[in-house]
Image (cartoon, rainbow, N blue to C red):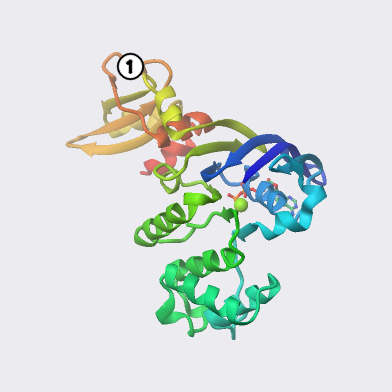
Amino acid sequence: MKVTIENVSKSYGKKQALKGVSFEMENGVYGLLGPNGAGKSTLIRILVGVMEASGGEVYMNGRNRKSCAREYRSKIGYLPQSLGFYPEFSGLDYLRYVAALKGLAGEKAEQKITDLVNQVHLTEDIRRKAITYSGGMKRRLGIAQALLNDPEILILDEPTAGLDPHERIKFRNLVSIFSRDRTVLLSTHIVTDIDSISKQTVMIKEGKVGRMGTNQSFVEAMNGKVWLMKMTVDELVDFQNSRIISNVLPLGDRMEVRVVSAEKPAKDAEPAQPNLEDAYLYEFESIGRASGEAFQI
Ligand SMILES: Nc1ncnc2c1ncn2[C@@H]1O[C@H](COP(=O)(O)OP(=O)(O)OP(=O)(O)O)[C@@H](O)[C@H]1O
Ligand SMILES: [Mg+2]
């Protein structure tokens, strides 16, 4: 299944949340990476069809979505950024409810639910109230409901928000397995959610696609732009205001500072092997903010 997003824009009143976004997806995991407010959820809601774009088109295998809206919707599975549960619903009640909404019923629905619950490792807890689940379990229940209609396209909006590292890894593996013969779009602002599983990453900022490519291409483009330097805490306080800093490591009485910079930041700076996080910082030019997050006095 090929999905083409062509020049999609969206305004909320005066606020232009999407400014002509275009890209294409076909099988595999696509990462939609961008900071808070970049327009990820807006784009996803338009893609899923729960919100109208102000301009632009979405095509499915070359056909305009508007001409095949019902078929398109039946092929999509969607995990929204926040998922609410009725307090009295068990995990099983919830899945039966969503199955009914998706037009699945009877033995077929029960079989599908049993299989999915097993795949997302919720069999033991499925009769318990969903609101008592941990964050990770809720997300896994969320992915199960998104898969009830055997979607060809799976769209996950910040699926790992609030998960601990263990649940995050489990979730990532689950997505990777499901993506074998499906198209998955996963939005996140956490680079490690996608650096090992996504085929392509779409970087979105301020409603525009910045760059798009394989993770390897992003990393390669950073060659010669990542440096290691040693400095004191006092020096770092000044330095971080004018530089992109991707990591700080205490090293004896000094700090080893990882700097993202097109030019060599100082005579004694040593070149370092770049990673996707460096590319993300470089793309979003989070000067000051990134360093503030990495290092606080
Ligand atoms: N219903 C709305 N009314 C007005 N402005 C909105 C609305 N929804 C989103 N916005 C604005 O549009 C921009 C994009 O929001 P969106 O939720 O798509 O971003 P996001 O990338 O999903 O962010 P986050 O990482 O915080 O989920 C933001 O500036 C946001 O404040
Ligand atoms: Mg969002």
Is 11 on the left-hand or right-hand side of 175? right
Q: Residue 282: x, y in percent?
A: 47, 29
Is 215 on the left-hand or right-hand side of 247? right
Q: Residue 223: x, y in percent?
A: 37, 21
Residue pictured at 38% horizontal, 44% vertical: 296
Ligand 1 contact, mark 1 (Cβ < 8 Å): no
Residue farthest toward the left in the current orientation of the protein: 252
In the foreground, 260 or 288: 260
Classed neighbour count for the residue bearing mark 1: other residues with Cα under 10 Å, few (<14), some (14–19), many (≥20): few
Q: Residue 46: x, y in percent?
A: 72, 50
Give the image quarter of residue 216: top left
Q: Is residue 80 visible?
A: no
Q: How many marks?
A: 1
Which amino acid is tagged 1? Ala
Q: Quadrant of the C terminus?
A: top left
Please name the residue that numbered disc 1 is placed on: 266
Q: Is residue 283 above or below residue 138?
A: above
Q: Is residue 42 visible?
A: yes
Residue pictured at 41% horizontal, 32% vertical: 278
Dot 1: element = loop
Q: Residue 248: x, y in percent?
A: 31, 37
Q: Is residue 157 above or below residue 231?
A: below
Residue pictured at 54% horizontal, 73% vertical: 112
Residue farthest toward the front in the current orientation of the protein: 107
In the foreground, 269 or 148: 148
Q: Is residue 272 above or below residue 46?
A: above
In the foreground, 189 or 93: 93
